[in-house]
Amino acid sequence: MSLAVRFSEYGTSEVLRVVDVPAPVPGPGQVRLAVRAAGVNPIDWKIMQGAMRQMMPIDLPAGLGYDVAGVVDQVGEGVTAFAVGDEVLGTPRTPAYAQSAVADAAALVTKPATIPWEVAGALAGPGGSAWTVLERLKVVQGETLLIHAASGGVGTFAAQLAVARGARVIGTASRDNHERLRSLGVIPVVYGEGLANRVRAIAPEGVDAVLDASGHGEIPLSIDLAGGPERVLTLVAFDAADLGIQVHTDGASGNGVRALRDILALIEEGRLHVPIWRTYPLAEAAAALDLSRAGHVRGKIVLLP
């Protein structure tokens, strides 16, 4: 048996229960992990509340968690890349808010010994998404990228990955987060009224591309700053698709392993930093989701089963 977080109805974190469930069994091409860390992301509480039921239908009772790091403790038929005892991270097939999770071996990478478990468990979802949207936006050296909500989960990864590519990054954030963004190589600006003027003061001719991770009405000014909708991409403003911008809802979109290898290399080189805001035991998953939902989190939240 294995402890796991489950919910049988949609609602606030009060619907969550930590229950004993049969330990998952890996199929062909899969491995089972003893979970050491599971990243907490906004999509988790949105699924719990039912906000994603049209886009991501699930059968109840269900679990949560799409980022995992752990130790392989069982190997399925045909797996040669990993063995029992290997430390890995990536995207699981079964929910990560649990003591045990199954993952496709092809969706995992080896965890470097120098990277702590809480960091390893926070990379796959936001890191993979950030890597993929930069590919979709075709951000290259010498260009200027505007990121709305640059201090958020995906925004922080995207900003650092873009800086590593040689791009200039302008990021919207509250003043409390400006110093941290500057330390990452980002030019911070306050969001809200007058944003377009503040961005043009930095980039008089506008920007080359825009990543919207905010969803607070910035799409029209983003199109104006980018000179058109083609290189404006949103992760959250789904109602703006008819304006001709790109809408991304598919996480790493099959790029997970490539993204993780790049991200891990940058972390080991000291060129990408993953601040951990809080860690919680599995029994306090509700508190972790409440903190994530409250927003203004300065780093990643991670469960440590």
Image (spheres, rainbow, N blue to C red):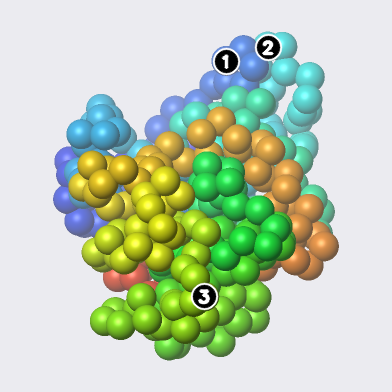
- The type of residue carrying mark 2 is Glu
Report the disc number at residue 27. Answer: 1
Which residue is at 38% across, 53% downward? 228
**Which of the two labelled residues, at mark 2 and mark 1, occupies the earlier sequence position?**
1
**Towards the viewer: 155 or 170:** 170
Tell whether label 1 touches label 2 (CB within 8 Å): yes
Residue 62 location, x and y as percent?
31, 35
Residue 174 location, x and y as percent?
39, 82
Foreground disc of the pair 1, 3: 3
Q: Is residue 124 visible?
A: no
- Structural crowding at the residue carrying mark 1, measured as other residues with C-alpha within 10 Å and reported as few (<14), some (14–19) or many (≥20): some
In the displayed structure, would residue 28 be above or below residue 67?
Answer: above
In the displayed structure, would residue 174 be above or below residue 39?
Answer: below
Mark-to-mark CA distance, 1 and 3: 52 Å
Foreground disc of the pair 2, 3: 3
Q: Which residue is mark 2?
A: 77
Q: Secondary structure at mark 2?
A: loop
- The type of residue carrying mark 1 is Gly
- The type of residue carrying mark 3 is Ala
**Rendered image quadrant of residue 52:** top left
**Which of the two labelled residues, at mark 2 and mark 3, occupies the earlier sequence position?**
2
**Which of the two labelled residues, at mark 1 and mark 3, occupies the earlier sequence position?**
1
Q: Which residue is mark 3?
A: 203
Question: As drawn, is 25 to the left or to the right of 297?
Answer: right
- Structural crowding at the residue carrying mark 3, measured as other residues with C-alpha within 10 Å and reported as few (<14), some (14–19) or many (≥20): some
Which residue is at 78% across, 67% downward? 270
